[in-house]
Amino acid sequence: NANSGADDGDSDIEVLEIDDDGNFAPAPAAGHASQATPAEAATITTAQGHSRASSIAGNGKWRCPSCSFLNEEFDSKCTMCFDDDSTEAELAKFLRGSAFDGSSDFGDISNHSFGQGNDSLRDDGGDQAWKALRATDTRELDSLAEHISEGRSLPKEAHKNVDEFWGATHNFPQLLRLFRQIILHPASQRFLEPVNENHLMIMGLPPFNSVVKHPLCFHAIVTALSKSEDALKCHHLVMRLSNGQLNVVGLQHWNMWNGTHLIEAIDLVFLNALAYNGSEESQEKIETEELRKILWDGVNSMLKSLKPHERRQHLPHKRTPTNDFVTR
């Protein structure tokens, strides 16, 4: 990439020649016979056994002596080259994308984490993509909560066959903000977008929809209430309220304007992950259960204002990962 502040005419193409030792060095400019300094042509052997040419341009970057790719200073080996001894663990870490601590080995990685959306590829674009999506969805939930709290107009589905407790103007916004809090949790990244079946196939894992009946993600739930795409295109959020229907086979009868259905939909995202990964303990399972606890603690906290018999009347169905509604 061109350095910031460079003129439009600047180019990041660097002409190289190979010295007597087989290392890449800048070619002398026309009319000059200067040679690359020993420091510029020096090689550094990394812990992985790769040799790389030290910085030529003085900006910390280094060029691979094998393929001439210009790598960042912090890269311990060439990004474009793969070792002959590349292991399944390396592939797993690459496919997983940004892990929570970045240190998990193949055996510790959740099957569900492999299947998440396109953001799971480790690159700056993917990282920015899921962050933008998270910011968009959380901003929309917050705006929608404010919209309802102020008593503004809602689609007819927001008033039809909805639970009276969760549909109250002071409860539904609180529920939306609880959902927003969950999405902002660092462990929620892998639940934002649909499971990526291609990643599962690459890893030799069973298809996600062969285990769970109703694959679902957070973004699908948000867009069932209001279209987040508008916020991606506009500086100021334009409210385009939806009819509350999920575009998921078998879940069309759920109405996201019904607080009971909304809670059960959020919970289903967690149940799907738990069902797919099985009963084996893992970091992802711990984090998923933590997120699920945040959801149900928030729900129960809101229900405390009711008498015991009223709580049971408005308590959503809390399923288990092995429930027939969840798994095939």
Image: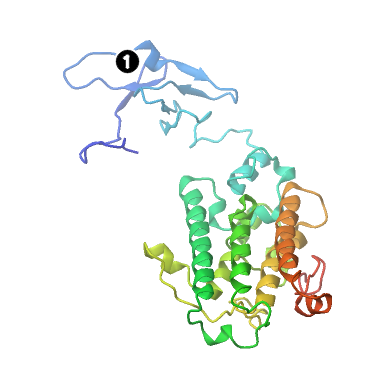
> What residue do we see at 27% from left, 37% from top?
5
Q: Is residue 40 above or below residue 264?
A: above
Looking at the rendered structure, the secondary structure element under dot 1 is: loop
Q: Give the colour scheme shown.
A: rainbow
Please, what is the three-letter code of the amino acid marked with disc 1? Ala
Position of residue 289 in the picture relative to residue 174 (left or right) = right
Q: Is residue 214 visible?
A: no
Residue 4 point in image, percent of width and height:
31, 37
> What residue do we see at 63% from left, 36% from top?
86
The residue that disc 1 covers is 36
Residue 16 point in image, percent of width and height:
32, 26
Residue closest to the eye, 273 or 41: 273
> What residue do we see at 64% from left, 57% from top?
115
Residue 203 point in image, percent of width and height:
67, 52
Position of residue 65 in the picture relative to residue 138 (left or right) = left
Residue closest to the eye, 186 or 47: 186
> What residue do we see at 51% from left, 69% from top?
146
Q: Which corner quadrant holds the C terminus?
A: bottom right
Residue 249 point in image, percent of width and height:
64, 78
Q: Is residue 239 above or below residue 189?
A: below
Q: Is residue 269 above or below residue 169?
A: above
**On the image, which quarter does residue 206 sit in?**
bottom right
Residue closest to the eye, 147 or 327: 147
Q: Which corner quadrant holds the N terminus?
A: top left
> Label 1: how many residues lie within 10 Å, few (<14), some (14-19) or many (20+)?
some
Q: Residue furthest left?
A: 31
**On the image, which quarter does residue 264 sit in?**
bottom right
